[in-house]
Image (tube, grey):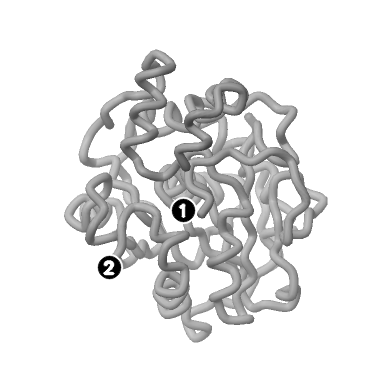
């Protein structure tokens, strides 16, 4: 299972698109809805392949790569959430030509949340639903920092997450290569502050693992205060990495909340677009 294991640039079942960093999984070109998936710390677009295989054909999965991995391997990783959100908002523009939704897992939930708040200001477009998995609400305050820990202490904390194979943690060369990416990813959430508590203008569906001590169902339920268009919470019998451990259950929950009957007909991006000057 791929958990907190940064990937070298390799061929993937996901087909590259003109917009670098966005990978549409094949066979869904005429799908009714596009589901953008934002990965956990150290994750990449390919970590959503198990989820994509379990979702119905009317949902097209688009995995997202951040700077510093896979096709964006030559770019410096970003450690500030506002900079990453702006980067993704610019890149995602051409793919907002049909109804879409966001799924963010762990750190990716914060990325999805802030991007959902940014897009209406730039393009007058919003996701049909914001699906957030395995991430405590930012209303609960700052997280315990680990991105500035010394190397050995940082690796030990990764070991506590039980998401990185021991052979990877023990590989000094590999860890030296990817530690900057991992540190940047953890810094995204550990330095993030919810300065604007205004609720996002889309429904939120939070998904929690009952055995997840990093984002308990109670911690996930706190997202409700940031939702003014509806909120629901689903609990899975799983731990933090239910994206890879129970992808079928996760897909069932996502498909149920993204019922075709709830999809809004697409509007013209060109007729409603307003580019924010930054």
Residue 83 lies, in percent from the top left, at 56, 29
**SS for dot 1:** strand
- The circle on residue 104 is 1
Residue 220 lies, in percent from the top left, at 25, 54
Given residues 140 and 179, the one toward you in this image is 179
**Badge 1: residue crowd in 10 Å (few <14, some 14–19, many ≥20):** many
Q: Quadrant of the C terminus?
A: top right
Q: At 73% from the left edge and 55% from the top edge, which residue is drawn?
A: 12
- The circle on residue 237 is 2
- Residue 189 found in image quarter: top left
**Cα distance in 3D space between marks 1 and 2:** 19 Å
Residue 274 lies, in percent from the top left, at 66, 48
Given residues 250 and 142, the one toward you in this image is 250
Number of the front mark, 1 or 2: 2
Q: Which residue is farthest top?
A: 150
Image-based side of 50 in relation to 197, left or right: right
- Residue 202 found in image quarter: bottom left
**SS for dot 2:** loop
Number of numbered labels in the structure image: 2
Query: In terms of sequence position, does the residue under pointer 1 or pointer 2 come before the other?
Result: 1
Residue 13 lies, in percent from the top left, at 73, 61
Visible residue check, residue 5: yes
- Seen in the picture, residue 192 relative to 218 is either above or below; the reply is above
Given residues 38 and 150, the one toward you in this image is 150
Image-based side of 275 in relation to 86, left or right: right
- Seen in the picture, residue 128 relative to 83 is either above or below; the reply is below
Q: At 34% from the left edge and 29% from the top edge, which residue is drawn?
A: 157
Given residues 271 and 213, the one toward you in this image is 213
């Amino acid at each position: 299972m791929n958990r907190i294991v940064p990937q070298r640039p390799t061929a993937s079942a996901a087909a590259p698109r003109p917009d670098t960093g966005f990978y549409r999984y094949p066979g869904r070109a005429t799908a009714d809805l596009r589901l953008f998936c934002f990965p956990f710390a150290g994750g990449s677009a390919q970590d959503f392949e198990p989820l994509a295989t379990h979702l119905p054909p009317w949902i097209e999965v688009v995995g997202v790569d951040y700077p510093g991995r896979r096709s964006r391997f030559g770019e410096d990783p970003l450690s500030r959430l506002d900079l990453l959100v702006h980067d993704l908002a610019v890149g995602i523009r051409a793919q907002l030509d049909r109804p879409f939704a966001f799924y963010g897992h762990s750190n990716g939930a914060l990325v999805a949340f802030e991007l959902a708040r940014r897009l209406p200001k730039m393009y007058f477009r919003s996701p049909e639903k914001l699906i957030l998995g395995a991430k405590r609400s930012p209303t609960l305050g700052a997280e315990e920092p680990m991105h500035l820990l010394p190397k050995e202490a940082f690796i030990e904390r990764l070991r506590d997450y039980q998401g990185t194979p021991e052979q990877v943690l023990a590989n000094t060369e590999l860890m030296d290569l990817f530690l900057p990416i991992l540190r940047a990813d953890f810094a995204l959430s550990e330095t993030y502050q919810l300065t604007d508590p205004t609720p996002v203008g889309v429904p939120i569906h939070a998904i929690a693992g009952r055995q997840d001590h990093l984002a308990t169902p109670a911690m996930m339920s706190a997202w409700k205060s940031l939702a003014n268009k509806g909120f629901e919470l689903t609990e899975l019998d799983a731990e933090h990495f239910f994206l890879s451990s129970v992808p079928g259950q996760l897909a069932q929950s996502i498909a149920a909340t993204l019922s075709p009957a709830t999809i809004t007909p697409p509007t013209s991006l060109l007729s409603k677009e307003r580019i924010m000057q930054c």
